[in-house]
Amino acid sequence: MKIGIIGGTGGMGKGFALRWCKNHQILIGSRDAQRAQESANEYTQAANQAYGSISGSISGADNNSVAEQSDVLILSIPYDNIDAVCSGLLSRVKDSCTVISPIVPMTKTDLGFEFLPLKEGKPFSHQMVQKHMKNKNKLVSAFHVISEKKLIDPNYTLDYDIFVCGDDKEAIDTVNSMIGEIKGLRPIFIGSGALAYQAEIATPLLLNIMIKNKMKNPGIKIL
Ligand SMILES: NC(=O)c1ccc[n+]([C@@H]2O[C@H](COP(=O)([O-])OP(=O)(O)OC[C@H]3O[C@@H](n4cnc5c(N)ncnc54)[C@H](OP(=O)(O)O)[C@@H]3O)[C@@H](O)[C@H]2O)c1
């Protein structure tokens, strides 16, 4: 499967690439094709060091060409840049492409981390991304409650749940199986994409818990 990562040069992009390159073709996307290639080379070295060898591959290109080629496309970009990045990009994806949003609308204030849709009345990420999609049902929200620090270290033992929201069974099944490929992660379905704010708000919740209680690497697990 070709898994494209828009903004793949960032911390989450590295984590996704390292976790899925064992079996898939990873396409790192960037606004700058050269930066994407440099990141792809760096991640390939890290993957070879961690796993010995990989059956998949990691390459880099500009965001638009990554979007056109991908079977699954992850939008690993900041919330503030959704409109700027997605307006020209999402019309280019294949009709069958599953699009994943891990994007968290969050800000840091004197109180701690706060959820922008509540604090400033802004739309949540799933709503903002969906506006730009041709095939709106192919959007799945997931991966808000796992930090890049845990994903980029293949030796870190994971034991967490990942909330999943979406409207298309095939797209949800694809994301569930990608989560299942990462040892120690389990997908937990919340419901329609219209409920994705419930997954997105879990990130500021976790970060406040982490800081106020001096907890290292908290995660979410439903018992
Ligand atoms: N970090 C975490 O632990 C974590 C955990 C859960 C969810 N998330 C969410 O996952 C997403 C990615 O997180 P991240 O920490 O990897 O983000 P990041 O490092 O801040 O940014 C990721 C990439 O987005 C691109 N980007 C940055 N500014 C941009 C702009 N003005 N316009 C267009 N593209 C821009 C950059 O790629 P190029 O410059 O190469 O184009 C950058 O490498 C975010 O929405 C975040 O809320 C993060």
Image (spheres, grey):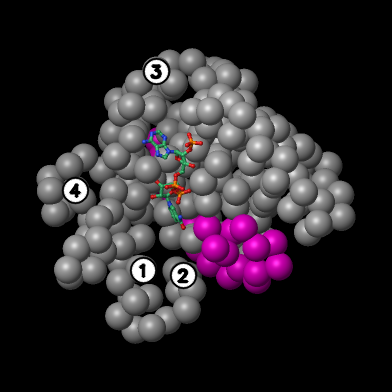
Q: How far apart are marks 2 and 4 (CA)?
A: 22 Å
First along the sequence among labels 2 and 3: 3
Ligand 1 positioned in quadrant: top left
First along the sequence among labels 2 and 4: 4
Q: What residue is drawn where x is 35% and y is 21%?
A: 87
Q: How far across and down, in percent of the image, does residue 40 sit?
A: 68, 39
Q: Residue 117 carries which label?
A: 4
Q: How far across and down, in percent of the image, does residue 36 sit?
A: 60, 34
Residue 201: which quarter of the image? bottom left
Q: What residue is drawn where x is 62% and y is 58%?
A: 152
Q: Which element type, helix, strand or loop, lies under badge 4?
A: helix
User: What residue is pinned by disc 2?
Assistant: 219
Q: Are marks 3 and 4 in contact (CB under 8 Å)?
A: no
Q: How far across and down, in percent of the image, does residue 219 sit?
A: 46, 70
In the image, residue 75 lies in the stretch drawn in magenta: no
Q: Are marks 2 and 1 in contact (CB under 8 Å)?
A: yes
- Closest to the camera, between mark 3 and mark 4, is 3
Q: Do the residues labelled 4 and 1 touch (CB within 8 Å)?
A: no
The answer to whether 90 is drawn above or below residue 16 in the figure is above
Q: How far apart are marks 4 and 1 (CA)?
A: 17 Å
Q: Which element type, helix, strand or loop, lies under badge 2?
A: loop
Check disc 1 and give the amino acid type: Leu
User: What residue is pinned by disc 3?
Assistant: 88
Q: Which mark is residue 206?
A: 1
Check disc 4 and give the amino acid type: Pro
- Closest to the camera, between mark 1 and mark 3, is 3
Magenta-tinted stretch: 148-168
Check disc 2 and give the amino acid type: Gly
